Image (cartoon, rainbow, N blue to C red):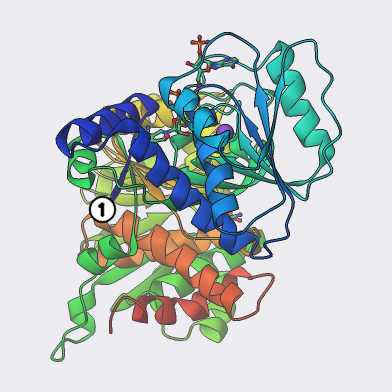
Amino acid sequence: MNSILTSAQMRLADQHTIEVTSIASIDLMEQASSAFVTAVMQLYPDKNTSIVVCCGTGNNGGDGLAIARLLQVRGYDAITVWIARFNSYESDDFAFNLSRLYHTPIAVTEFFPADQLPDIHQHVVIDALLGSGLNKPLEGDWLRMAQHINQANRQTVAVDIPSGLRADGAIPEGEYTVRAHEVVTFQRPKLSFFFPESANSMDAFQVVDIGLDEDFIESLPSDFGLVEAADIQRIYRKRKPFSHKGTYGHALIIAGSTDTMGAALLSCGASLYSGAGLTSACIPKEGLVALNASHPEVMYCSWADLPYTWGSFDAVGIGPGLGKACDNLPTILTYSSKPLVVDADALSFLGGKTALLKQLPLHSILTPHMKEYDRLFGPHGNWWDRVQSAREQAVALQAIIVLKNRYTFIVLPDGTVRINPTGNPAMASGGMGDVLTGMLVSFLAQGYDPQEAAVLACYLHGAAGNQLVAAGMAVVPASRLIAELPRAIASVGI
Ligand SMILES: NC(=O)C1=CN([C@@H]2O[C@H](COP(=O)(O)OP(=O)(O)OC[C@H]3O[C@@H](n4cnc5c(N)ncnc54)[C@H](OP(=O)(O)O)[C@@H]3O)[C@@H](O)[C@H]2O)[C@@H](O)CC1
Ligand SMILES: Nc1ncnc2c1ncn2[C@@H]1O[C@H](COP(=O)(O)OP(=O)(O)O)[C@@H](O)[C@H]1O
Ligand SMILES: [K+]
């Protein structure tokens, strides 16, 4: 897992690297700038590309100056530098890099507050105005400069972070930032990149290694970690040669109603294709023909039989398309001591029912999307607040909260958060969450503990979607994703 640092921790890592490895801070800036330039050269290999580098006077601006020089050394001849001299401050490394720039043919123009900014004719803008040192919203000349860059509507690449975007904390609605097509960020992604509000500031990011001390970074206490393929390799257990259906557990999906039987079928299919030894469906009887036609492997369990058969299930999920039958949830909670997966209608049913929420078996998995989350725990004005609230709720309920979005936040009972990187907009269609629920129940049934099951299911769900997009699909229906699950699992190990 890749820990994600706050900007204060990033500064610590910066200082630590300088002290321990005896690298001078100016050389660290050079390493960062060189890594940035390598990324830019891949984005714009044509060395005739005209580029304007817009620099502040702190270390982000210092990076910008070094980037301009290094691009020129690597053969890019159409480089212009603008410096925003909007106050008297300049960092030492900025000043040093400015003196280096005067030995090059690069044209440097400094803008003071009263100056008019010329039109931007260049093909690419490199945004090095402000970085992780941002401590207030853009205003005055800084705001005008950011607006000028955005209005030029050129290809914009931000150094470390789009100027004006904060690295962590709530992103207030309407906060103005430079709008970057690509962010080349140093060493670790910034936490704010994973919040939907950052979509106003950036389309994509890539992380470049600038040589900070990785052991030190990983030793810092971090509440947020990015799930990596290596985590999935570590968690996933290969199927054994002498195993049989009993080895992989019995999953029960309680779902569906007359009008929403498809949700139940999708969950059951996902359980089956994720490898549960047996999958049973507790659905309204009128869904049986459809169930047998779509997934003949799945068995049926009636509501009347549930109290007697409950002990035979290794994991239970409840909620997709369940409708009115949610009224049975209080009874179900009296049966269960094992963790449940609670989704969709069952989550809405639990909204505001604090006493019932507290009856959930320990380490149950709740899988709300944003609206379901707010229905459960009250409205939140932004994603930062929602995630902080989910951390408190996960600790209070000793539950795992899978807060679904482009980047799903898997919030663990100790209040720490795992961020799932996989998935894509081709998956943004109805039924996708029902598939995730089936996968979660399946992995629980196979004996993964709830935290492992949550990480595994979210990662493989998105990985299956990514595989289908890579194979040429622009849209991925949920039923198609199910069929891809075995291949996504195979990519981890057969
Ligand atoms: N950490 C690392 O690993 C490495 C980091 N590196 C680079 O350093 C960057 C961080 O640099 P940094 O700390 O000098 O801050 P930076 O963003 O340039 O701001 C400077 C000054 O701006 C001011 N200011 C703030 N907000 C403002 C606003 N809204 N409007 C107006 N002014 C505002 C504020 O001054 P104040 O207002 O407090 O007087 C602040 O002091 C980082 O993003 C990366 O690019 C790499 O070189 C090497 C490795
Ligand atoms: N743009 C996207 N990028 C990544 N994952 C997505 C995207 N859109 C949807 N998903 C995933 O699809 C699922 C949607 O869940 P949900 O909204 O509950 O769907 P439904 O209720 O229709 O079954 C979540 O797991 C979410 O992470
Ligand atoms: K920047």
Nearest the camera: 473 or 263?
Answer: 473
Q: Which residue is mark 1?
A: 450
Foreground pick, 62 / 488:
62
- Count of all numbered marks drawn on residues in the image: 1
Q: Residue at x 19, y 87 (%)?
A: 244
Query: Is residue 12 depicted above or below 190 in this figure?
Result: above
Q: Which quadrant of the figure shows ligand 3?
A: top right
Label 1, secondary structure: give it: helix
Within the image, what quadrant is residue 150 found in? top right
478 displayed left or right of 49: left
Check the image and name the residue furthest to the front.
Answer: 103
Q: Residue at x 65, y 43 (%)?
A: 105
Whether 493 is drawn above or below 86: the answer is below
The residue under the point 82% across, 25% down is 117
Residue 393 shows up from this direction:
yes
Amino acid found under the numbered disc labelled 1: Pro
Report x, y in % for residue 199. 64, 41
- Where does the image place residue 90, in percent across and percent down from the top left? 50, 16
Q: Residue furthest left?
A: 242
Percent x, y for residue 330? 37, 40
Foreground residue, 213 or 66?
A: 66
Front one among 385 and 339: 385
Apparent side of residue 371 relative to residue 494 in the rendered image (left or right): right
Up the image or down, 317 lies above or below 364; here it is below
Give the residue furthest to the bottom.
Answer: 241
Instruction: Tell me if residue 326 can be seen.
Output: no
Residue 414 location, quadrant: top left
Mark 1 Cα-neighbour bin, 10 Å: few <14, some 14–19, many ≥20: many
Left or right of 414? Residue 354 is right
Give percent across and percent down for residue 70: 52, 49
In the image, what residue occupies the spot 43% across and 69% down?
A: 281
